[in-house]
Image (spheres, rainbow, N blue to C red):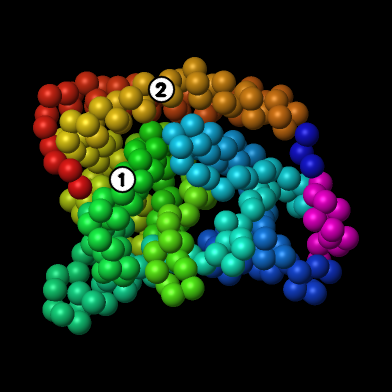
């Protein structure tokens, strides 16, 4: 069932709660109607139920792979419907997003007359930016980039189109020292094959480079999504290639179909077309992944 959670959050009237400041518009969100509730929850209004299903499927996969996620719920909020997510900034925690980290690194490069990457939201540049911003040791960087790589592979598996620099963050302590990577969040722009297959990473140089989704390295900028996956598997070492192969094999079309119907049953929604649209797109994507993996066999690459 879809819950109306106004009373659960002790809110008697949505509009009055906004007027009193208990609910604040989230101006940092790209969503037209996004709110922060009592500094503990994020609510996105007018989110279609299909986007919620995609968000939850990505959450389920990530959690199965030992990656922490922000738990989202599809709720009625007074007269509004949308996604509710608990903030991960609890108990005084603070976080810095990718845009801030990479901008600082680009400023450093500019001041020292070093080349500046035009599309910096890629694993290669992120490593350098994190090293500069936090002065991390190589062992710390290796561990952190291993986590980024796992998340990147899940993005490839789930056709993620929106892992921009505003959609990944790291925790910092009171002295702005690195304190870990935040949970995965904002994953609902995924599992839509026609968008993913046709998408290229904004070859127009006038577009903001931070609108570009996470990629492997800067060579991927002008590649289509499937060209990037082929390139990624040609570049990485055997162990990473095998890890991606194992990930893909683990989440067959049947698994995603089961996830869809589990989620719809929880919500009390009987909409086979909604599930079948996701299953169809994922099935097409899955077959392409299997072909790419097959072609990449026996090609040795490199580590990050």
Q: What residue is rendered at 15% in x and 80% in y?
A: 112
Which residue, given by chain and number where applicable, does mark 1 sit on? Answer: 146
Magenta region, main secondary structure? loop
Name the quadrant of the N terminus: top right
Q: Is residue 196 magenta?
A: no
Secondary structure at badge 2 equals helix
Look at the image and tell me whether residue 17 can be seen.
Answer: yes
Measured Cα–Cα span from mark 1 to mark 2: 20 Å
- Residue 9: which quarter of the image? bottom right
Q: Earlier in the sequence, mark 1 or mark 2?
A: 1
Look at the image and tell me whether residue 54 can be seen.
Answer: no
Q: Which residues are magenta?
A: 4-15
Q: What residue is rendered at 14% in x and 41% in y?
A: 302
Q: Is residue 88 left or right of residue 203?
A: right
* Position in image of residue 185 (x %, y %): 51, 50
Q: Is residue 11 magenta?
A: yes
Which residue, given by chain and number where applicable, does mark 2 sit on? Answer: 250
* Position in image of residue 166 (x %, y %): 44, 61
């Amino acid at each position: 069932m879809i819950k109306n959670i106004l009373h659960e959050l002790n809110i008697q009237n949505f509009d009055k709660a906004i007027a009193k400041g208990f609910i604040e518009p989230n101006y940092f969100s790209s969503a037209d109607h996004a709110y922060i509730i009592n500094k503990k929850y994020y609510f996105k209004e007018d989110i279609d139920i299909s986007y919620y299903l995609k968000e939850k499927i990505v959450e389920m996969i990530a959690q199965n792979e030992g990656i922490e996620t922000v738990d989202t719920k599809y709720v009625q909020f007074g007269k509004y419907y949308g996604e509710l997510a608990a903030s991960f900034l609890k108990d005084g925690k603070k976080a810095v997003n990718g845009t801030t980290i990479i901008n600082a690194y680009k400023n450093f490069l500019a001041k020292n007359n070093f080349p500046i990457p035009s599309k910096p939201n890629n694993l290669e540049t992120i490593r350098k930016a994190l090293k500069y911003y936090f002065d991390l040791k190589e062992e710390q960087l290796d561990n952190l980039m291993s986590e980024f790589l796992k998340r990147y592979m899940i993005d490839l598996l789930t056709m993620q189109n929106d892992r921009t620099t505003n959609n990944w963050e790291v925790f910092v302590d009171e002295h702005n020292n690195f304190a870990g990577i935040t949970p995965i969040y904002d994953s609902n722009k995924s599992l839509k094959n026609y968008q993913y297959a046709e998408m290229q990473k904004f070859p127009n140089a006038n577009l903001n480079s931070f609108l570009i989704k996470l990629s492997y390295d800067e060579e991927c900028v002008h590649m289509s999504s499937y060209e990037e996956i082929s390139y990624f598997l040609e570049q990485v070492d055997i162990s990473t290639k095998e890890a991606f192969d194992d990930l893909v094999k683990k989440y067959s079309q049947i698994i995603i179909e089961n996830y869809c119907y589990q989620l719809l049953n929880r919500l009390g929604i009987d909409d086979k077309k909604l599930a079948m649209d996701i299953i169809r797109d994922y099935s097409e994507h899955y077959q392409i992944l299997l072909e790419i993996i097959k072609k990449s066999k026996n090609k040795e690459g490199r580590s990050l």
